[in-house]
Image: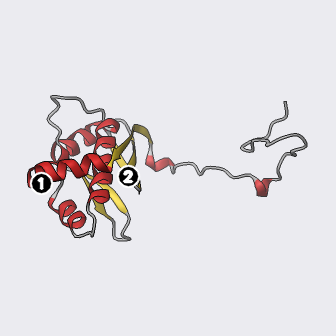
Amino acid sequence: MPDYGNHIPEGPGDKKPGPEEIISIPELPESTGRILGLGIDIVASERVRRMLETHDDRFLKRCFSEGEREFSMSRKDPVPYLAVRLAAKEATFKAIGARRGMGLGWRDFEVVFTGENIPALKLNGPAKERGDRLGVNKIWLSLTHEDEWSAAVVIMTGHEG
């Protein structure tokens, strides 16, 4: 079988692409370290809508920082913004290796914006301490929401502590 590199042939007669046609995924800078944790989560907007209707302020204050609440509640429909933040928090629980009884809470993970207005993840309190112990020096965050679903992927990189 011929070596197609990063190219997957689509059918008979498909030729090996030239170097300018190959799409490759960039490597992480060496200073970033290795992947220490990975988490993914998907949240149904209806679930968040029900919690908001049923528990209102209690739900908001338990799960979201003041900044997250202000940002989301200022939107015409805050549910997708809350749902995607909840997905980010659940993905972070997975990436950081959290389990019940570790003393980590919802507000220990916070979606903030960088100076370029790009969503980023901030670790607070016990989550920051755990991240430092693990050697996390960068957190990669991807958020999406479409119709009734919100999803997040979190990758933590660094040098093991």
Tell me if label 2 and label 1 are in contact, CB under 8 Å: no
The quarter holding residue 106 reads top left
Q: In this rendering, would 125 be left or right of 34? A: left
Q: Secondary structure at mark 2?
A: loop
> Is residue 131 at least partly visible in the picture?
yes
The answer to whether residue 101 is above or below residue 76 is: above
Q: Secondary structure at mark 1?
A: helix
The amino acid type, in three-letter code, at marker 2 is Glu
Q: Position of residue 35 (x, y in %)?
A: 44, 39
Coloring applied to the structure: secondary structure
Q: Nearer the viewer, residue 14 or 48?
A: 48
The residue located at (22%, 45%) in the rendering is: 128
Tag 2 residue: 148
Q: Position of residue 52 (x, y in %)?
A: 17, 53
> Is residue 109 at least partly visible in the picture?
no
The residue located at (31%, 42%) in the rendering is: 92
The residue located at (25%, 49%) in the rendering is: 48
Quarter of the image with the C terminus is: top left
Tag 1 residue: 56
The residue located at (84%, 30%) in the rendering is: 1
Q: Nearer the viewer, residue 64 or 115?
A: 64
N-term mark: 2 or 1? 1
Q: Position of residue 11 (x, y in %)?
A: 83, 41
How many angstroms separate mark 2 from mark 1 (CA)?
19 Å
The answer to whether residue 159 is above or below residue 121 is: above
Q: Give the number of the disc on residue 128.
A: none
The amino acid type, in three-letter code, at marker 1 is Asp
